[in-house]
Image (spheres, rainbow, N blue to C red):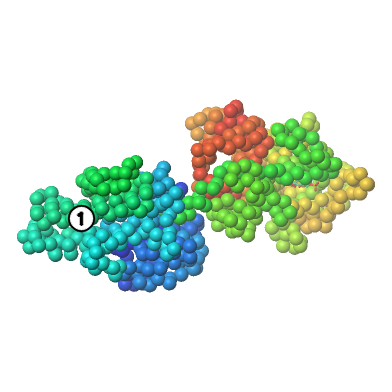
Amino acid sequence: MIAVIDLGGTNTKYGLVESGKIIVANSTPAEPQDGLEKHLNKVVKLINDLCKDFGKKISNCQGIGLLSTGTVNSKDMLVLSTNEKYDDAKGFNFKNWALEKTGLELRIENDAKGALLGEYHYGAGQGSDNVMMITFGTGIGTAVISEGQLLTGSNFFGGNLGGHMIVKTGGRKCTCGARGCLEAEASGWALPIIAKEHPLFSSSSLKNETVIGFKEMLEHAEKGDECAIDIRRHCFQIWGEAIVSYIHLFDPERIILGGGLMNSADLVLPLFEKTIKEMAWSQGKGLQLVKAEHPDNAGILGAAALFKNEDKAYYPLTFEQVYKPTIWGGELLQKLPRTLPESSMPIGESWEIVDRPDDQSRVVTGELAGKSLRELIQSDPEGIVGDGHQANQPFPLLMKIIDAGQDLSLQVHPDEETCKYIEGAEPKTEMWYVLDHKPEAEILTGIQEGVSAEQFRKSVNDPNIKDLMHSYTSEQGQSFFIKATTMHAIGGGNLIYEVQQNSDTTYRVSDWGRVDKEGNPRELHVDQAMACLEHTLGNKKPGAHRIMPLAFTPLTHNSELKRRQLALCEHFHVEEIEFEGAITLPVNTGTFQTVYAVDSDLRIECGGKSYAVKHGQTCLIPAKCGECTVYAPVKSRVVSAKTPA
Ligand SMILES: O=P(O)(O)OC[C@H]1O[C@@H](O)[C@@H](O)[C@@H](O)[C@@H]1O
């Protein structure tokens, strides 16, 4: 979502835009007399009020897109001159103001260029890369896009000052200081002057009008008023000739016409077309003359389009796996359609999504291929992870597949509280989803009720310590919630999908007497484990946190779609979705979401493109990704994880 401000001469428009759609827009009178900063602060407050309706704050936006009258240096975010509006805009540090006031990045552009950007991306300019826009309003604004780029020039007014093209040598004095500019000879602000100076004005019906604008001039001419007819002839001649000059200068494929004059488009367009035919090079062959599609809101859309480049980069991301050989690794992973690396020890873990100092997921497909998850988060934390995420914060979760050829150690992970007392410890709550298992494979989780911490510690070298634990026979599709400080061990013969807090802290109490080829045992961490345990047992919290499979709950009329919640805690929300055909994932939830393909290859459609997710692969849908539809050719399950709302 982008906050937008269009500082006009009379009114300031403001609003919220998401993916080229105006969510809400409003306007407030411009107050140049009170100074720019005061006015901008007021507008920020108004935008914040709009955000509240969506349960958000302005700081949740991706940035502020701002349009200003006058010449705008869009590289350094400065207004260079305003031509009599908001004198104090010149030299004002818009960038710092936005950062201090809202914490947001700001982009700024001239208003006529902004309106063209709006039409180019979301309106009458779509499909052409050589477009000019002319806005006939109080003044006459122009902007040019040539080969897909906004024309800038050496002083940022390239293509922008079409209203100040001199059309009459030694003509009327213009607001810009020159004489005979198009604006001075035929614009909204010049019309009353032109009328009053006209020799027939004293006998004209225009004399009775309090305001003489395009509308009045055209109406009176239509009724046969001689003075209005002559002014109309004069204006159309000048405008038509100016357009011919623009065609000769910029060679556009399409000219978009906007502003108040276009309320009479049916009259105006044929007259312009006639002049072009008579006077333009090659009679303007192939040139399209069109009316603006967003007469009132092109600026609002264009201000948001200043962030468009960042907007469009996201799509469902798949990553290279990071493999971890372990002493207990197995061979169930080999059943998945993937090539495993050669290794002297069997692969125990496949890290599917990871952002840790020593291990990084790297994107495999699309224009972000090769980028690490860290790089992506650093450049757009909220776009990848979700609202409020900071660039220096790691991805909150870690997803793994654990291939247990043998029993893993009997172990425990610390929680936030225990980590305060153990240097370097990181909290780790995890959940498991049994993907596959050998017959008789087991899971141990939770110490039996009534067993004291002391009794447990005395048994750490006893092979029968298993008897002090709850044990479960593995079942495909079964899930376990392993809250930090819960003692557990994954038994040999299990293939497990794990969603966990981003941590690598494990305290082993027993490795079942296992040694490596050289006869060395792995390190144990009994003291630290007991510190975690005492916390649990001391508080007499239940030891086991197994989540029994819940009854399937159909959520839609489509009885083919079944969802069940696997784990819901402060760190993650994991669910299993079973479906055949297509499901559309919710968009703009303020968080990323991951999709693991449990049973078959999947296809995800996003932004008109199709992305493959192989059976056994995890796909990350960034927070600011567009709408995604997941297709499964046959009845399939996915395990989807996200951070809770
Ligand atoms: O310490 P070992 O036995 O290698 O087991 C370590 C593994 O334990 C599992 O229960 C999970 O928590 C994994 O995330 C972890 O990597």
**At 72% across and 41% down in the image, what residue appears?**
401
> Image height check: is 430 above or below 205?
above
Task: Tell me if 615 is positioned left or right of 304 in this view.
Answer: right
Q: Judge by depth and name the residue closer to the eye, 122 or 333.
A: 122
User: Secondary structure beneath disc 1?
Assistant: helix
Q: Which percent across, then down, holds residue 24?
A: 38, 52
Q: Quadrant of residue 34?
A: bottom left
**At 58% across and 51% down in the image, what residue appears?**
385
Tell me if I can see residue 633 in this picture.
Answer: yes
Q: Which percent across, then down, holds residue 391?
A: 60, 58
Q: Residue furthest top?
A: 634
> Image height check: is 286 above or below 189?
above
> Image height check: is 580 above or below 35?
above
> Image height check: is 295 above or below 596?
below
Ligand 1 within 8 Å, label 1 CB: no
Task: Tell me if 518 is positioned left or right of 96 in this view.
Answer: right
Q: Judge by depth and name the residue closer to the eye, 548 or 560.
A: 560
Tell me if I can see residue 123 in this picture.
Answer: no
Q: What crowding class fits label 1: few (fewer than 14 Cα within 10 Å), some (14-19), or many (20 or more)? A: some
**At 10% across and 49% down in the image, what residue appears?**
223
Q: Residue furthest left?
A: 203
Which amino acid, by three-letter code, is at mark 1?
Answer: Cys
Q: Dot 1 corresponds to which residue?
A: 235
Q: Which percent across, then down, holds residue 472?
A: 75, 37
**At 40% across and 68% down in the image, what residue appears?**
80
Q: Residue furthest front?
A: 282
Task: Tell me if 526 is positioned left or right of 124 in this view.
Answer: right
Q: Which percent across, then down, holds residue 611?
A: 58, 37
